[in-house]
């Protein structure tokens, strides 16, 4: 099981870079980090998202590592769906451009909690402050969860219901004794072929 390194309790230390954190936590190898850094220098993009896109790490693990690195919380936007009236305090263009969604607001304190793909973006936090009039506080969410939340809240899209494979017969019927015997015989022949 990968272990996230413990923080040094001494003050004034610099935060580890996300790549270093992922390697020291044994979530990726040094070779995978080196390859991702080469790709990033050639094609750009955020290192963590490039690792997710390459299938090296899953986005939930990345979100947890970012949250640990920045001492923030991770929010699961599927289990804790933001109230639409709160989320819509942030204009859709800002939500889409910066990959964020408002999840809670404290009107008395003039604060808004924003689930972000990139909580380090000062530009994003500035836009949230400018457009809402609230002081933004960031938490971390996965890219796919932010994207689904934006589509659900601003465009009214619900999760698509998977289309059943037409080759599968999903009707519930009783298998006859002859069908069962035939299936057992085919299974037995297959096993004999594998054992030869």
Image (cartoon, grey):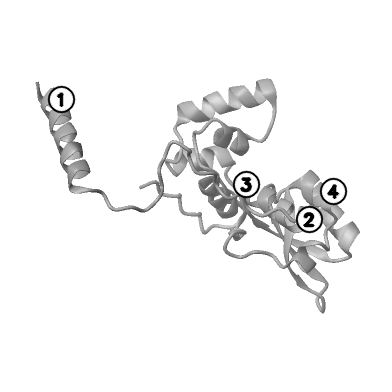
Pick whichever of labels 1 and 3 is earlier in the sequence. 3
The reply to whether dot 1 and dot 2 touch (C-beta < 8 Å) is no
Residue at the spot of label 4: 93
Q: Is residue 47 above or below residue 122?
A: above
* Marks 3/2: CA–CA distance: 15 Å
Q: Nearer the viewer, residue 18 or 74?
A: 74
Task: Tell me which corner region of the image, top left, top right, bottom left or bottom right, holds residue 89.
Answer: bottom right
Label 3 environment density (alpha carbons within 10 Å; few <14, some 14–19, many ≥20): some
Q: Nearer the viewer, mark 1 or mark 3?
A: 1
The reply to whether dot 4 and dot 3 touch (C-beta < 8 Å) is no
Q: Is residue 122 visible?
A: no
- Label of residue 154 in the image: 2
Q: Is residue 58 visible?
A: yes
Q: Tag 2's secondary structure?
A: helix
Pick whichever of labels 4 and 2 is earlier in the sequence. 4
Pick whichever of labels 4 and 1 is earlier in the sequence. 4
Q: Nearer the viewer, mark 4 or mark 1?
A: 1
* Marks 4/1: CA–CA distance: 58 Å
* Marks 4/2: CA–CA distance: 10 Å
Q: Tag 3's secondary structure?
A: helix
- Label of residue 194 in the image: 1
* Marks 1/2: CA–CA distance: 55 Å
Classify residue 44 as left or right of residue 91: left
Q: Nearer the viewer, residue 167 or 193?
A: 167
Label 4 environment density (alpha carbons within 10 Å; few <14, some 14–19, many ≥20): few
């Amino acid at each position: 099981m990968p272990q996230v390194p413990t923080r040094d309790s001494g003050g004034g230390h610099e935060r580890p870079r996300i790549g270093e954190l992922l390697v020291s936590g044994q979530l990726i190898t040094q070779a995978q980090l080196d390859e991702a850094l080469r790709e990033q220098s050639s094609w750009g993009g955020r290192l963590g998202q490039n690792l997710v896109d390459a299938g090296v790490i899953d986005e939930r693990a990345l979100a947890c590592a970012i949250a640990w690195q920045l001492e923030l919380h991770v929010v699961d936007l599927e289990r804790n769906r933001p109230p639409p009236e709160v989320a819509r305090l942030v204009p859709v263009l800002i939500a889409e451009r910066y990959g964020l969604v408002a999840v809670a607001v404290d009107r008395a304190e003039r604060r808004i909690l924003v689930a972000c793909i990139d909580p380090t973006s000062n530009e994003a936090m500035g836009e949230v402050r400018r457009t809402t009039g609230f002081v933004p506080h960031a938490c971390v969410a996965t890219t796919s969860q932010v994207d689904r939340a934006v589509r659900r809240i601003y465009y009214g899209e619900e999760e698509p219901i998977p289309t059943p494979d037409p080759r599968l017969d999903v009707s519930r019927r009783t298998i006859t004794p002859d069908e069962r015997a035939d299936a057992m015989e085919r299974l037995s022949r297959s096993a004999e072929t594998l054992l030869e």
